[in-house]
Image (cartoon, rainbow, N blue to C red):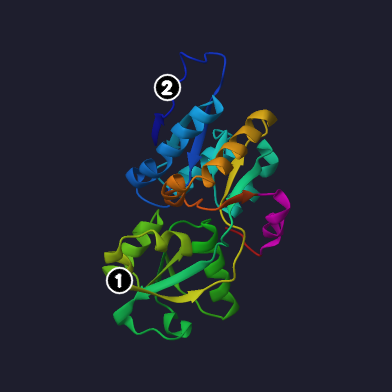
Amino acid sequence: MVGTAVADCADEAPDLPAYAVHVVPQRPAQVTFGAWSPYLIRLGEMTGLCFDLVIPRSIPQFEDGLLNGQADIAYANPYHLVMAREAFRYQPLLRDEKPLTGIMVARKDAAITDLTALEGRSLAMPSPNAFGASILNQLALAERGITMKRAFVDSHTNVFRAVIVGRAVAGGAVNNTLLRERDAVQGQLEVIFETEGHPSHPLIARGTVKPAHREAIVEATMAMADDPSLKPMLNAMQLPDPVHASLGEYMDLADLPWDR
């Protein structure tokens, strides 16, 4: 697990808690750190709060931390919020305006034009509970009676690499992660299926985070979104157009026919 204190405020504000901010590791740790560290530094400056960035090594490790209440604040997939909401009263604060979709990708030279061509073949996915990348895609395949061999490879980036090098004929990811891959990666892949849209990954807060602090985080992030110079920073962390999020937007996921 990668952790770092991104706001040097312990000495300046010894009475304030240092909130542990866990980010679901969709991409390599150094990429995630580079995307989130500038935001949390700016957030600390604007709110006077302290934040510790925590990047788990895998999505299952992230889930363990969330379900054990180790995260005060987290950037989580929608299903993670549903999983953890009751035990530690997690509430969504913000999400990006753009809907989240699950996608399946294949190499461009694979010439796959129909999902039935995937029957009995290998599908790379980040982890069992990756919402768009794994859950939505597997439900779509099940609805069509298509059975595939599942290979869990820890991150969205690893999914793309597995498809490119031929370890899997197709891979499950989400629209937001593919759009942020290097051109060299995107250029070798094509989207062969896309699910319906859902509210995107929320920034969530545990019930122990003070209401005033939650409000300060939301207001500061919204203010950042109004500053064109900060747009690239928010885009890197997949929140280019933040909007208020509510628990009701995600509760229909509790009824998904999903048994992990």
Q: Is residue 91 visible?
A: yes
**Mark 1 element type:** loop
Q: Which residues are magenta?
A: 245-256
Q: What's the residue type where badge 2 is placed?
A: Asp
Compared across the picture, whether 207 is left or right of 138 comes to right
Query: How many neighbours does mark 1 have within 10 angstroms: few (below 14), some (14-19), or many (20 or more)?
Result: few
Residues at circles 2 and 1 in contact by the CB criterion of under 8 Å: no
Compared across the picture, whether 254 is left or right of 23 comes to right
User: Residue under circle 1?
Assistant: 187
Secondary structure mostly seen in the magenta stretch: helix
Looking at the picture, how far across and down is residue 195, in whole percent? Answer: 55, 71
Q: Residue 48 falls in which quadrant of the image?
A: top right
Looking at the picture, how far across and down is residue 241, in whole percent? Answer: 54, 53
User: Residue under circle 2?
Assistant: 8
Which residue is at 70% across, 49% downward? 246
**Mark 2 element type:** loop
Query: Which mark sits nearer the N-terminus, 2 or 1?
Result: 2
Is 111 in front, or is 241? 241
